[in-house]
Amino acid sequence: MEKRRNILLWIPTVLYGMAVGIRNFAFDKGILKSWRSEIPTICVGNLSVGGTGKTPHIELLISLLKGEYKVAVLTRGYGRKTKRPIIASPEDDATRIGDEPYQIKRKFPEVMVYVDGNRKRALEKMEMMPPGERPDVVLLDDGFQHRRVTPSYSILLTPYRKPYYKDYLMPYGRLRESRKEAVRAETIVLTGTPQKVNINEKRLKIENLRALAFQDVFSSYIKYERPCCLFNREECSSHEQLRQDSDIQVVSGIADPTAFQNACLSSFPKVIDFISYPDHHDFSKEEIGVLVRDLESDPHLFILTTEKDGMRLLAKKKWISESVRGRIWILPISIDMDLEDKIILLRKAKKAIKFNGLPL
């Protein structure tokens, strides 16, 4: 039955592929014009729908660049309730700017986070900023398909578990563009690579990417940081500390929760339940009410969720009673690479910033 359903999806898949192919052909031939900003831009994107870890890779780039450059992040703010362009401030929340922009702003308050679905308009606004405010480099979050802006440097992410060469165009698969469009990237990153990777398997995956001579291929790894209370210290009392033997309810609203759930289970053997929602899930008052009642009925229970989900829960803080806030914790993640890969990535990024991606 499943096979028959999938076969029927080939018809809209072919039509979708034709439409996307015509659009890319028009950009390739200059029929549709692409524009390069005066401010160097680094694009982090993918070919597939969600689940490749763009936000933590943006955070990695911020960490690498912020010591030398005034860094800005340009993102559309998926899931926000507002429409107009917004430069994020500490007073904003996930409802106003989106969960991922809010996460970045909380981690890097010194970084400009510009929320606007129109990349060209936002970059033009940044170009007009006075020298003290104008960024030296802009990181384009999920900008690979937005061809009206030509980036200085393009980084394409693809999951180690299912690289784009194993996937198909939507709706049959999860690809937004044809696999051959990977040629537009200067760097390809296999994300979510296992720490204890099979070298032969990894080598085969890299070979199957069929990277061109000018393209680097790197691997990135997920690092789970120490869990921390979602709310501030005043709301997290010292006696409400998450311990290895605590009863845990794992809550997530991300594209693929498998790795997160496994990480929780490996650190906390007393996981009693997994609750999964769709990616960028907007928690309703009723859903939060269920979580709160679970915590109120069991004083030993903790909720452990992702950092991104935590940003959305913070926006609904008014529905979470103060008595249980100290038992809602997040498990932050970061991205790491082999030192050699990280050095090459930084060198390529600096070169792109210096020359704005133009050939020497």
Image (cartoon, rainbow, N blue to C red):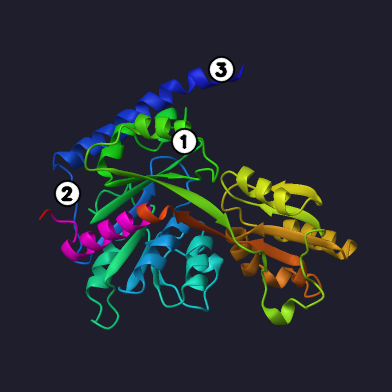
Q: Which mark is residue 132?
A: none
Judged from the image, the secondary structure of the residue bearing numbered disc 2 is loop
| Front residue of 269 and 198 | 198
Q: Which mark is residue 3?
A: 3
- 339 vs 215, left or right, is right
* x and y, in percent, of residue 214 in the image: 22, 43
Q: Say what secondary structure mark 3 lies in.
A: helix
Instruction: Please state the extent of the stretch shown in magenta in the rendering.
Output: 341-358
Q: What's the residue type where badge 1 is placed?
A: Ile
- The earlier-in-sequence mark between 3 and 1 is 3
**Mark 1 nearby-residue class (10 Å; few <14, some 14–19, many ≥20):** few
Q: Which mark is residue 199?
A: 1
**Residue annotated with mark 2:** 33
Is 218 in front, or is 69? Answer: 218
Mark 3 vs mark 2, CA separation in Å: 41 Å
Q: Position of residue 318 (x, y in %)?
A: 70, 72
The amino acid type of the residue labelled 2 equals: Lys
